[in-house]
Image (spheres, rainbow, N blue to C red):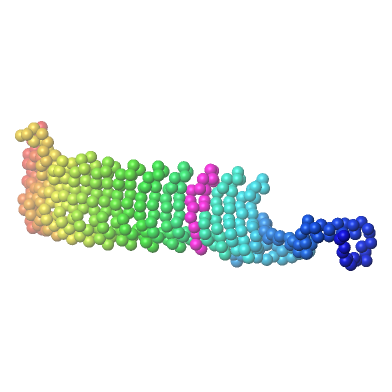
Amino acid sequence: MLTTNLILPFNFEKINYMRRLIYCLTLVVCGWIPVTVFSQPQKEKNYPLVRKVLASALELRNGVAYAPMKANSQMEGSSPFTGIAIVLWPDNRINTEQGYLNGYKNGTYKELTEKGIFVAEETWESGKKNGYFKYADEKTGVVVVEGSFKNDSLDGEVKGYYMNGLPMYVKHYREGIRQGSAISYFDNGKVEQIANFDNDMPDGAVISYYPDSILRYVKEYKKGMPHGRYYLFHRNGCAANEDYYKDGKHDSISRVYDAVTCNLIAESRWKSGKRNGAFIEYNAFGDTLRIETFIEDQRDGRFMEMKDAWDDAIKKMKLKVESEGMFEEGVRQGPWVHGQVSHYQQRSGSYLDGEMVGRWIFMDNNGEPLVEQVYDDKGEVLKEKYFKVNKR
């Protein structure tokens, strides 16, 4: 028989209460209810309460957001806000949510359109953007860029996307400055350009492609300045331009190629950004059209220009000299002819330090003699004789 030694409070006088108590103790002794149910009452779980207020209720002072304080059902002053500030659309849907800690933006910022479409998400710490972010197209909610901030500046990898979800670019930043690789893509997913940046300046080869992956150009840089190869390519894959740079200045040979025949159509020589050597132009078949010679960026040496003219002997067009002569230190010297094919300002004679001297013959638009002039060594006309014009 179960016996118990109970010391009941003086107010436990009702027999029904004692019956219930004896019943419970019997269950404990028999093991049907654990003793811990009575000896160790379970504690209630405490969940932190997050305070939410309308953003319009906050007051900004020196960059710190303050919220009204409530005590004894009365509003008494304000304190730096900790919680979530919200902005609502007219229909009471959420527009924005911004976390705060001790008056500074902290935690997650989210933004939705009036239709509930996702627009933006940012991570804040101590009043500055720090951490992951993503922004979306406000009409579709498709994410168009994502990355991370450090103290309000882009930092780390930043990715952009087309509306079809394919990558648009992948760039790298260090505290707001481009640092490292940068790759852009066409909307078909193929690479458009590959580059590398050092302190926000291109450094190394910048390689670009056409949408079908045909090479478009290769440009080499050193700390933001052209240095090395500077190659351009036509749409069909043929070389277009071949240039070289040294510390930002045009240097060495330069070549230009025809888009149809892929043949060389021009070449020149440079030294430290100045023209230095022969500059030659060709037609698509390789025939020489023009020659100029430079020394230290001044014309110095032979000059010749060719044009197509009808040749009765062979009954077809043939390249003939249009203009020809010599330069010395940038001025014409010695015998020259001008406009021999086009008859535009056609003339022939000699120069001395850039001044016409001696006998000069001027032709009309048909290549017939028009006037003869004789100059002194200062370029002053001494004699002048007109020719009889033959009527045609």
* Closest to the observer, 248 or 207: 207
* Closest to the observer, 68 or 213: 213
x then y, percent, for residue 51: 68, 59
Q: Residue at x 8, y 42 (%)?
A: 369
x then y, percent, for residue 166: 44, 45
Viewed as shown, does residue 220 lie left or right of 371? right
* Closest to the observer, 66 or 369: 66
Q: Quarter-wise, where is residue 244 in the image?
A: bottom left
Q: Residue at x 65, y 63 (%)?
A: 81
Quadrant for the N terminus in the image:
bottom right
Furthest toward the front, the residue is: 1
Q: Residue at x 92, y 62 (%)?
A: 12
Magenta residue check for 299 = no
x then y, percent, for residue 275: 19, 57
Viewed as shown, does residue 58 lie left or right of 370? right
Q: Quarter-wise, where is residue 62 in the image?
A: bottom right
* Position of 343 relative to 381 (above/below): above
**Highlighted magenta segment, given as a residue range:** 134-151
**Residue 76 seen in the figure:** yes
Magenta residue check for 135 = yes
Q: Residue at x 90, y 65 (%)?
A: 8
**Residue 345 seen in the figure:** no
Quadrant for the C terminus in the image:
top left
Magenta-highlighted stretch: main secondary structure?
Answer: strand
